Image (cartoon, rainbow, N blue to C red):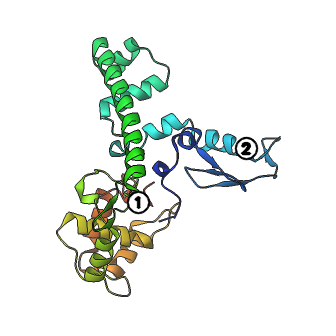
Amino acid sequence: MNSKKEIWNHSIDDIVKGYTESEDGYECIVCGRTFERGRIYPENELLYDACGAVRKHVSAEHGNMADYILGQELGLTGLSEVQRQIMQLMSGGKNDKEIASAVGIAQSTVRNHRFKLREKEKQARMFLALTEALEKKTRSRIDISDKGVIEEIHSSATMIDERYGITEQERIKTVKTYMDENGGLKQFPAREKKKIILLREIMKNFKRDVEYTEAEVNRVLKRIYEEDYPGIRRALIEYGFMDRAADCSVYRVKE
């Protein structure tokens, strides 16, 4: 898996823009493409400086960031499926009547969801302020427990809960217990948290932006855990690490 910084680790302003700015230039926070300051970028017979080029890139390749964020897993945005549908329609410029018709709910329900979303926004702002104030007071982040820093969740996780409260020490211990020095799996544990840790390690054998056939995936997984490589393959799909075509002909690392 790539080392690109997860989108939620950027500032709100950068997420809204879709890119970050540094002394050297600009970087798309979605795909990691960089644009060097001082360089001119041609695009459709037009010339752009680095700032213009990254803006053009984000718009052309990833669309509006509101729509991109709404396309992420629900566990990442904290929205319900209905709320996501409503916000997608809002993003498309639909009014309450049109939204109600599209979703199959009453206009009063749409208004109620608008109120709830506004409350969610206020709560999010207060929570961000709280965590920053708490960090300044205690000089410690909320993701640092007695057992160490809680590691990041992969952005395509299908369900985010306490199973993902994994510290570096837990990861190291689990990998040492269940994997050999060559990356082979000794056994696949029943505990969910340990499964997630090991699936993360297994994903290091696959690259983003590469399409794999099922045979290629099986070949990699068979080397890691010949005893039940189909089970590992299914787990990678179920836990949101990989995606596959409906006919299972193509597998990809899930973004």
The quadrant holding residue 119 is top left
Residue holding disc 1 = 249
The residues tagged by marks 1 and 2 sit, at their Cα atoms, a distance apart of 39 Å
Q: Does residue 28 appear to the left or right of 203 in the view shown?
A: right
For image coordinates 38% across by 57% down, the residue present is 140
Q: Is residue 143 above or below residue 168?
A: above
Task: Estimate the x, y position of residue 180 in percent, counting from the top left.
Answer: 32, 86
Task: Estimate the x, y position of residue 160 in percent, counting from the top left.
Answer: 29, 51
For image coordinates 42% across by 46% down, the residue present is 132
Which of the numbered marks, if any, corresponds to residue 109?
none
Task: Estimate the x, y position of residue 146 in percent, counting from the top left.
Answer: 27, 66
- Which residue is most to the left? 190
Q: Nearer the viewer, residue 188 or 234?
A: 188
Q: Is residue 121 above or below residue 157?
A: above
Q: Residues within 10 Å of mark 2 (few under 14, many from 20)?
A: many
Q: Is residue 81 above or below residue 114?
A: below
Q: Secondary structure at mark 1?
A: loop
Of tags 1 and 2, the one toward the viewer is: 2
Q: Residues within 10 Å of mark 1 (few under 14, many from 20)?
A: few
The quadrant holding residue 175 is bottom left
Which of the numbered marks, if any, corresponds to residue 51?
2
The amino acid beneath tag 2 is: Cys
Q: How many marks?
A: 2
Q: Is residue 21 above or below residue 163?
A: above
Q: Nearer the viewer, residue 109 or 128?
A: 128
